[in-house]
Amino acid sequence: MAELILAIEDEEPVREAIVAALEADGFRVITAADGAEGLERLRGERPDLVVLDLMLPKIDGMDVCAQIREHSEVPIVMLTGLDEEDDRVKGLMRGADDYITKPFRARELSARVRAVLRRSTHWSSDDRELLELGDLQVRPAARSASMAGRELNLTPKEFDLLEYFIRNAGNVVERGRLLDRVWGEDEYIDPRTLDVHIRWLREKIEDDPSDPKWLLTVRGKGYKLVKP
């Protein structure tokens, strides 16, 4: 499957240019319009590389880069202006793997992305990756999970749901996004299917599934995984 690229860029014309350039070269591309949304999509979508603009609303590119490096080695290509040499150096020091200046040519962007991917370790293949929230532990590579040392015998869909929740811990995850992420955008799934799997998952992680403390329902929106 083609590599997935996350483009975090607030200017719509530039964002569209990034998508067009990378998709024309065979990449899959998802986008975010500000730093906060970018971090959320990173946790939920697990891209192979991030194209990160330096100047972003809500959380600027430098801080986004630093936060990514706190928990991930996903490659980062930073977008900067022509006159931002000091910022390019700071970005590389914060953990960016490369940079490209705006305005950029489509072929140059694709070439930089491919070069960084070739020399970078694929973050999702690290079998040492461990996701933790209190007593809950999830090991994506092994597709295993435990609660307070007790192994959870999860079905594939239950594991996919739990991994997505723990990567978005503390945030509300909309029902539609869960259906698209776990079952796929191209397949119609009765929304009640999600309800059934949520109930089954609660039976495995909650002391009292009828009074959940970990996996909460946010009425009218979706669900949220929290540490009790």
Image (tube, grey):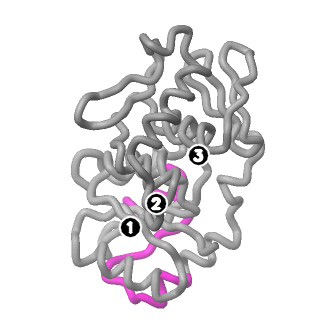
Q: For the point 46% across and 44% down, which residue is it?
A: 66
Residue at 56% x, 28% y is 200
Q: Secondary structure at mark 1?
A: helix
Distance from Cα at disc 1 to Cα at disc 2: 6 Å
Q: Position of residue 100 (x, y in %)?
A: 43, 75
| Number of residues whose C-alpha sits closer than 10 Å to that of mark 3, classed few (under 14), some (14–19) or many (20 or more) | some
User: Magenta segment: does it hold 65?
Assistant: no
- Image coordinates of residue 93 in percent, x first then y, are 52, 52
Q: Nearer the viewer, residue 42 or 103?
A: 42
Residues marked 1 and 2 touching at CB (< 8 Å): yes
Mark 2, residues whose alpha carbon is within 10 Å: few (<14), some, or many (≥20)?
A: few
Q: Which of these two is toward me, 47 or 188?
A: 188
Above or below, 201 against 76 in this view is above
Give the number of the disc on residue 72.
3
Q: Residue at x 52, y 41 (%)?
A: 164
Mark 3 lies on a secondary structure that is loop
Q: Nearer the viewer, residue 134 or 176?
A: 176
Residue hosting label 2: 89
**CA distance separating discs 3 and 2:** 20 Å
Which residues fall within the magenta stretch?
Answer: 87-111
For residue 195, side relative to residue 125 (left or right): left
Three-letter code, disc 3: Ser
Circle count: 3
Is residue 110 something one can see in this rendering? yes
Q: Which residue is the site of mark 1?
A: 85
Residue in view at x 74 percent, y 16 percent: 150
**Residue 93 seen anywhere in this rendered image of the structure:** no
